[in-house]
Image (spheres, rainbow, N blue to C red):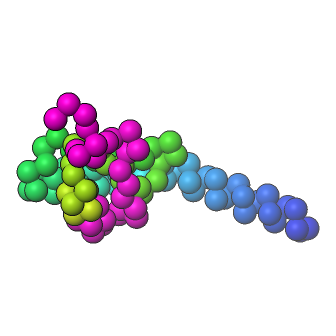
Amino acid sequence: MNRRTIFLLGLTVVIGFAALWHWPLGAGERLAGKAEAAARAQLDRDEMFQVQARIERGPLSRRLIVSGPADDFQRAEIIRRLDAIPGVLDVRWDPASLPQEGRTGR
């Protein structure tokens, strides 16, 4: 076997396993669902009912995107607490979600 054949065979195997993981076996989606449920439970315990957390999908990753009204202290604390959830690699605020102090009309 030459190098090109070995490379193409390895690439096919990796793509096949990734396809099985994300689609019919659904492990990626189950992981995302568990992480989102754990994040929602943590936000509810912290009484942050207007703050939302979702796993980034497109492509599916282990990054938790958080949005909603919160001041700078709350944002830092939410990031710290949600970052401890098993399966979550990174927590970031949605750039479209303004800090509570930055909102006009209050």
Instruction: Examine the structure image and report whether residue 103 is included in the region drawn in magenta.
Output: yes
Q: Which residue occupies the extreme front position in the image?
A: 105
| Residue 85 lies in quadrant | bottom left
Instruction: Examine the structure image and report whether residue 38 is included in the region drawn in magenta.
Output: no
| Residue 88 lies in quadrant | bottom left
Q: Residue at (31%, 65%) from the top-left corner?
A: 83
Q: Quadrant of the N terminus?
A: bottom right
Q: Can residue 58 be seen here?
A: yes
* Whole-percent x, y for residue 23 in the image: 48, 44
* Whole-percent x, y for residue 41 in the image: 15, 53
Q: Can residue 37 be seen here?
A: no
- Total labels: the figure holds 0
Q: Nearer the viewer, residue 32 or 8?
A: 32
Q: Residue at (38%, 39%) from the top-left corner?
A: 96
Q: Quadrant of the C terminus?
A: top left
Q: Residue at (42%, 57%) from the top-left corner?
A: 62
What residue range appears in magenta? 78-106
Q: Residue at (13%, 49%) from the top-left corner?
A: 48
* Whole-percent x, y for residue 15 in the image: 64, 53
